[in-house]
Amino acid sequence: MVIMSDIFLQEDINHILCNKFVVIIGDSIQRAIYKDLVLLLQRNRYLSDAQLRSKGEFSFVNDELIEGGKKAKMCNGKGYREVRQYQSDYNLVRFYFVTRCYNTYIESVLADLSCDPKPDLVIMNSCLWDISRYGASAVDQYKKNLERLFTRFEETFPKECMVIWNTTLPISKNAKGGFLVPEVEFMNSTLRLDILEANFYARQIAVAHNLDVLDLHYFLRHQLHRRADDGIHWDMTAHRRMTNLIMTHVCEAWREQLPGRVDRNRNETKQMSRNVEREDRIDHGRYSDPRNDNSRNGHREENLRPNDNSVREDRWNGNFTNFTITRNNNAKNTTYQEYLDETSNNHNNYTDARVIYDPNARSNMAAVQNRPVPCSPASVLQAFKQMSSGEYQWQPYQQNAIQPLSRSYPHYRQTQRENPYNSRSVKVGHSWSSQW
């Protein structure tokens, strides 16, 4: 089975990236990826909205601003620079903000990375600025720059270094702010299609140079509700998903063992589904009329008596309850498996009765056997005739009275699950909504 991404926590990230030098190069989206990785290296929490929106700060969760940002001139132009670095006893993560995939500034970055320590992992993306802020020939220049960039990667980085090219994420048709200055807002309607073509072209060039490609556009194309108000950036949960996707790719490339939390959650979900189905079969198999909720409740209260001989899992609070099954009709104690087998046979015997409504099976209800379709003109006229003759006795008619037992209780998928990163729950889309 192919797993798109696993779930990584602080201990997993620290183990995988122990004594590793990670470099992230790109725009504001890649800066948020850097911040989420740095945060996860120190604690199991999500980024806040303020942390996602801020740029150029002197320090972010124990990292350091090396160059640019608030140490220089803050602007929203092509000349903006920002270099950040997080360093601990066992981790080194660095970020370079760029507005073009290849130029003289990229050459200076490669010169830094050619010295010791050499990077073990390089993650990069640059597209939106390249194709929107550099004139009419920006697309042609972008294609040439990609060739130069990947060639320089091969010349600069050792073979042990893994280079991952992230594809550009989808943007809204009403994107605003960021790189979209008023002079280039006319490109808003076609920029989404340009991104698709740029991703396809970059993938071909990267594969030709034996580089890795992680298609974040594909994985987040159905997560547009996690996009920010400006239609460009993304919220905290989307960036944690990007981190999980990147780390899953790294584990598979480095042959590291995945945490396996997705498999465990899938197995727990299957087990909970089996428990729900098993209890439905028990309750339905005791009575021929599954529509009588009072009889089902009485069956549960009277016939399931606590005992220490068998164990079942309680689907409400996760505790374990001991019980045996006493059948009052013949005063005979049976094992749990025998009771399951017999109730399964009974369940198969009345399957048709649950699907097709049988008026004869409903007691204490007058004027049902020969009554036409409810709420039709014929049924209303017949009711008036019976009322005038004194033969009609009104009883409520419930057309959808037959419901599976599990619908009477909250399904496990409807319960709020614990957030694995924060002690509090995260409201997705609370302050960052979709503009698609």
Image: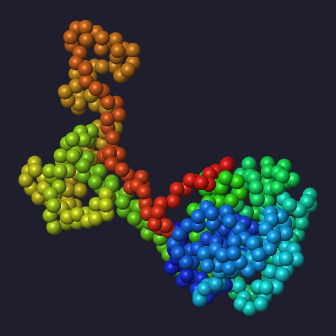
- Relative side of 265 to 67, left or right: left
On screen, residue 355 above or below 318: above
Q: Image quarter for residue 249?
A: bottom right
- Relative side of 256 to 273, left or right: right
**Residue 42 seen by the camera:** yes
On screen, residue 223 above or below 370: below
Which residue is pictured at 82% across the width and 85% down the height? 111
**Residue 165 seen by the camera:** no
- Residue 59: percent from left, percent from top: 66, 76
- Relative side of 318 to 360, left or right: right
- Residue 224: percent from left, percent from top: 63, 54
Which residue is pictured at 69% across the width and 75% down the height? 58
- Residue at the outermost top position: 388
Closer to the camera, 136 or 398? 136
- Residue 181: percent from left, percent from top: 82, 55
On screen, residue 102 above or below 413: below
What colouring method underlies this structural image? Answer: rainbow
- Residue 72: percent from left, percent from top: 80, 74
Which residue is pictured at 64% across the width and 56% down the height? 227
- Relative side of 336 to 163, left or right: left
Count every numbered label the image shows and give the total.
0
Closer to the camera, 122 or 67? 67
Which residue is pictured at 69% across the width and 71% down the height? 57
Closer to the camera, 411 or 72? 72
On screen, residue 390 above or below 310: above
